[in-house]
Image (cartoon, rainbow, N blue to C red):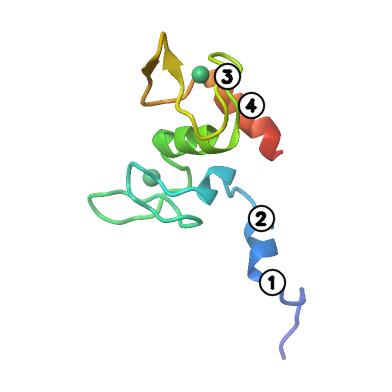
Amino acid sequence: MTIRHNAPMPTEIRHYMRAGQHPSRSVACPFCRALEHKPCRVISNGRHLAEPHPARRSAWAEATACCPHCQVEPGIPCHIDGVPLSQVHARRLLEAKETAA
Ligand SMILES: [Zn+2]
Ligand SMILES: [Zn+2]
């Protein structure tokens, strides 16, 4: 006997409802090269990681949020005195989280 708990949902909706799914997965990971919506992985053995790499969170914040610290728009890297940073400011990550929530 088969009991169906839930009607099948479209993949898109299921993606956003899955617990623990970090919104930064909507961008590719510049560190391990995981594609959009794919989990980060350990480069040496290919195992999937539950948490995205910091570089991915940074790339996600850069793509989706303005930085309250250096006043740049989405898509523009953070900078200090005009020198681009490889990671975004911590406040920009918070901004991105609030936008995604
Ligand atoms: Zn990664
Ligand atoms: Zn910044």
Q: Residue furthest left?
A: 44
Name the element at disc 4: helix
Label 1 vs 2, first from the N-terminus: 1
Label 3 vs 1, first from the N-terminus: 1
Q: Residue tagged by mark 2?
A: 16
Q: Position of residue 70 (x, y in %)?
A: 53, 14
Q: Residue at x 25, y 54 (%)?
A: 45
Q: Is residue 10 left or right of residue 75?
A: right
Q: Which label number is shown at residue 91?
A: 3
- In contact (CB < 8 Å): disc 4 and disc 3: yes
Q: Residue at x 69, y 31 (%)?
A: 98
Q: Amino acid at mark 2?
A: Tyr
Q: Residue at x 36, y 43 (%)?
A: 30
Q: Nearer the viewer, mark 1 or mark 4?
A: 4
Q: Is residue 79 left or right of residue 25?
A: left
Q: Amino acid at mark 3?
A: Arg
Q: Amino acid at mark 4?
A: Glu
Q: Which residue is at the front of the view, 31 or 63?
A: 63
Q: Amino acid at mark 1?
A: Pro
Q: Which label number is shown at residue 10?
A: 1
Cβ of disc 4 within 8 Å of ligand 2?
A: no
Q: Residue tagged by mark 4?
A: 95
